[in-house]
Amino acid sequence: PISPLLDQNTPDFTSFRLVSEWLEAIKMERYVDNFTAAGYSSLESVARMTI
């Protein structure tokens, strides 16, 4: 069996321009409004998120 880590269908995350595109690719598009409301309008801001 193929390891999920080696899945060839993994999207190229460097190709996303919008937070919504990224969330859709990782099957989390239902959180677009949450990210927008929290002020995360760019992938750069998402990358700097902390818990």
Image (cartoon, rainbow, N blue to C red):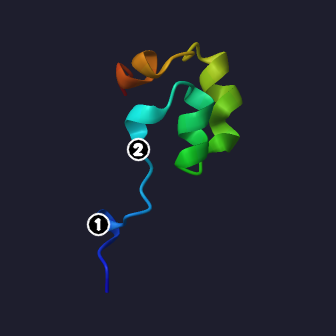
Image height of 39 relative to 51, above or below: above
Expressed as whole percent of the image width and height from the top left, the position of residue 45 reads: 44, 16
Identify residue for label 2.
12
Q: Position of residue 16 (x, y in %)?
A: 49, 32
Q: Disc 2 marks which amino acid? A: Asp
Residue at screen point 45% across, 49% down: 11
Q: Is residue 10 above or below residue 25?
A: below
Q: Is residue 8 above or below residue 32?
A: below
Mark 1 residue crowding within 10 angstroms, few (<14) / some (14–19) / many (20+):
few
The residue type indicated by label 1 comes to: Leu
The x, y position of residue 33, in whole percent, is 70, 28
On screen, residue 35 versus residue 50, left or right, reads right
Give the quadrant of residue 48. top left
Q: 48 or 12: nearer the eye?
A: 12
The quarter holding residue 3 reads: bottom left
Residue 1 is drawn in which quadrant?
bottom left
Vertical placement of 27 versus 16: above or below? below
- Which residue is at 41% across, 39% downward? 13
How many neighbours does mark 2 have within 10 angstroms: few (below 14), some (14-19), or many (20 or more)?
few
Q: Residue at x 37, y 24 (%)?
A: 47
- Callouts 1 and 2 close, C-beta under 8 Å: no
Q: CA distance from mark 1 to mark 2?
A: 13 Å
Residue 51: percent from left, percent from top? 37, 28
Q: Which dot marks residue 6?
A: 1
Please tell me which of labels 1 and 2 falls first in the chain. 1
Report whether 43 appears left or right of 18: left
Asked which secondary structure carries label 2, the reply is: loop
How many numbered tags mark residues here?
2
